[in-house]
Each structure stands twice: as C-alpha cells, then as structure tokens.
Amino acid sequence: GLPERVTIYEVGPRDGLQNEQALVPTEVKASFVRQLLAAGLPIVEATSFVHPKWVPQLADAAELMTGLSADLGDRARELPVLVPNDRGLDRALDLGLRHIAVFASATETFAAKNLNRTLDSQFAMFEPTVARALAAGLDVRGYVSMCFGDPWEGPVPVEQVVTVGKRLLDLGCQQLSLGDTIGVATAGHVKALIAGFGRAGVGVDRLALHFHDTYGQALTNVHAGLQAGVTTYDASAGGLGGCPYARSATGNLATEDLVWFLTGLGIEHGVDLQAVVDASTGMAAHLGRPSPSAVVRALAQS
Ligand code: HMG
Ligand code: MG
C-alpha cells in the first residue's frame, strides 16, 4: 500500500523566488516564510547562501535569516538553506543555522552552468563543506539536479544519477533529493530511478523527490514515488519557481496540488491547504502574476 504519512518539504521561498527578476523585499519574504510555517509545513527551505552575483534575488539571505530569528528564534535556525561551498557554510554558521543542503548536478553541462565546476570537481567543492557541517552537528541534505533530463544533454541515464547520488551519500549527506529540474520526468522513469538506487543499496528512506511541473506530470510522478515507498516530497507554494541556470525550468510542483492530492488519498501531511493558498496568493499578488496551479485558482475564488 501507500505510505500513511508524507513529509512536505517546502521550497517556495528558495526555489520559487530565486528565479524572480524583480527583487522581493526581505520583509515580504519573511512574512511568506512565517505564513508557510503557520500553515503547518514542517520544513521550509528559506534561502541560499550562494554567490550574490549568481542569484541576486537571494543576496539578502543573511538579513532574512536574522529577521526570522528575531521572532522565530530556534525555529528559524532549523530552516534549511542552500550552501554550495565553504564560503556559504561560513555564512550559515555565523547565523547559527542547523540545516544545509548542497546541490550537485547529474550532468556535466549543468555542473558548469550552475556551479562553475566539472561533474567531478563539484565533489571537491562539497567535500570539505559537508565534512565541516557534519562535524558542527548540522544536518546536510544533498540535491541532485537533472535526474531525468537535461536541456543540453537530453535524457540522463539512471546509472549516471545513481553514481552522483551515491557520491553525495558517501560524503555524509543524510538525505538525497532527486530533482527533475526541467520537469520532464514520467512515472515510469521515476520508478526506474528509484529501482536503480535500490540496486545500489540506497533505500527509499534516504530519498526525497523534487518535481517541476513543466509537462504537467508532477503529481503522477509523486504517485509513482508513493507506490515505491518514498515519503518526502518537495513542493513550492503556488507553484512558484524555476532555476535561473536551467533554460526551460518552470515552476515546481505546487504545494497546494500536492496537499489536495495527498488528502484525497487519505495520506497524512499536517498542512492547512487554505492557509498555503493564502500565503501563495499574497506572494503572487506581490509578483503580479497568478499561480499556474489549478488548485490555487479554484480555492482562491471560493
Ligand atoms: P565561482 O565563481 O566558481 O566561485 O562560483 P569561487 O569559488 O571561484 O569564488 C569566487 C568569488 O565568489 C570569491 O570572492 C568567493 O568568496 C565568492 P573573491 O575572493 O573573488 O572576492 N563566493 C561566495 N560569496 C558568497 N557566498 C558564497 C560564495 N562562494 C564563493 N557561497 C559558486 C561557484 C558555487 C559560488 C557559484 O556557482 C554559485 O553561487 N552558484 C549557485 C547557483 C544557484 O544557486 N543555482 C540555483 C540553485 S540549484 C537549483 O535550483 C536546483 C534544485 O532546486 C534542484 C532541482 O530542481 O534540480 C536544488
Ligand atoms: Mg528545483
């Protein structure tokens, strides 16, 4: 049967906003994060400690986390943030943050475009960072991007993704989030990838799935993940998002779509759907663009 309970890992403030051209004021981001937490989302990835020239939208990462710590205290320090290297880790440690995520590419081209590294040399960048983070008692998630297809290289072989994922686990990452960065995954491919990890000795308890909804397959792909036993799913409130370094990456699976779907299956998630809609429609109004999610549109009208 399907899992009884699922963890929704909210990435809207990070994956959702990183791609927005117009700078969103730090205080607007902070209230978005607070609303998402108040909606019952157990994990809200807040921002990235990356190079500010690479992702200008998230250049205010330190101010955001400081502002959130002022009223949320320890709760803010538990929010995960992206960290690609030692410089990013220093910035996160300065603020007392406890959860980081490194992000690897399964393909050569995207490693160059997103990290300015080769497929192989990205691990030399992550290695000291993950080791120091673990030594400091932090939790470290490892993302793998382009797990299904890559806009420059086409379909990505399962074994190539498994090799990259295993290297992140060998560095000490506790969880792997398998990213369909450009939203080309299909249910059969999801099943095959999870099976590939299984053959390599990586169980579903170590895996999370991260879908973008470009081809409208994200929920079907979640269903394939549920059937295989995966219990953590990344989603973005309102379906905000994309990746600034991946041509053709569109919005993430909308958190509201995921919540509606899980509720329909009787799977526990702990999230107040209307409260997420309220948070995401507030952000959509700020950005001046309606949500692509049909669930959001339906509930925002009711
Ligand atoms: P680089 O230019 O190779 O960096 O970029 P470097 O190590 O050569 O350092 C150059 C300068 O940058 C140095 O300063 C560093 O201090 C500074 P200088 O000495 O010249 O004055 N620097 C930094 N400053 C602040 N914070 C830092 C930092 N690092 C270096 N962390 C780097 C390499 C990784 C930094 C760059 O490529 C980068 O920031 N990339 C981030 C790209 C990104 O954030 N992409 C989006 C997230 S991934 C994603 O969305 C996919 C995901 O959602 C899953 C999916 O959908 O697949 C996760
Ligand atoms: Mg993403």
Image (cartoon, helix red, strand yellow):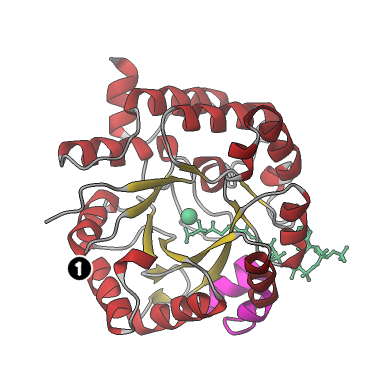
> Residue at coordinates 27% horizontally, 24% vertically from top-left?
298
Q: Secondary structure at mark 1?
A: helix
Q: Is residue 53 at least partly visible in the picture?
A: no
Residue 111 magenta-drawn? yes
The boundaries of the magenta stretch are: 107-125
Locate residue 232 relative to residue 175 in the image: left or right. left
Q: Is residue 236 above or below residue 53?
A: above
The percent position of residue 62, horizontal first and vertical second, equals 75, 43
Instruction: Classify the position of the N terminus by image quarter.
Output: bottom left
Three-letter amino acid code of the residue under disc 1: Gly
> Residue at coordinates 45% horizontally, 80% vertically from top-left?
166
Residue 226 lies in what quarter of the image?
A: bottom left
Q: Is residue 300 at least partly visible in the picture?
A: yes
Q: Is residue 183 above or below residue 166?
A: above
The percent position of residue 169, horizontal first and vertical second, equals 48, 75
Q: Identify residue for label 1.
A: 188
> Residue at coordinates 69% horizontally, 39% vertically from top-left?
65
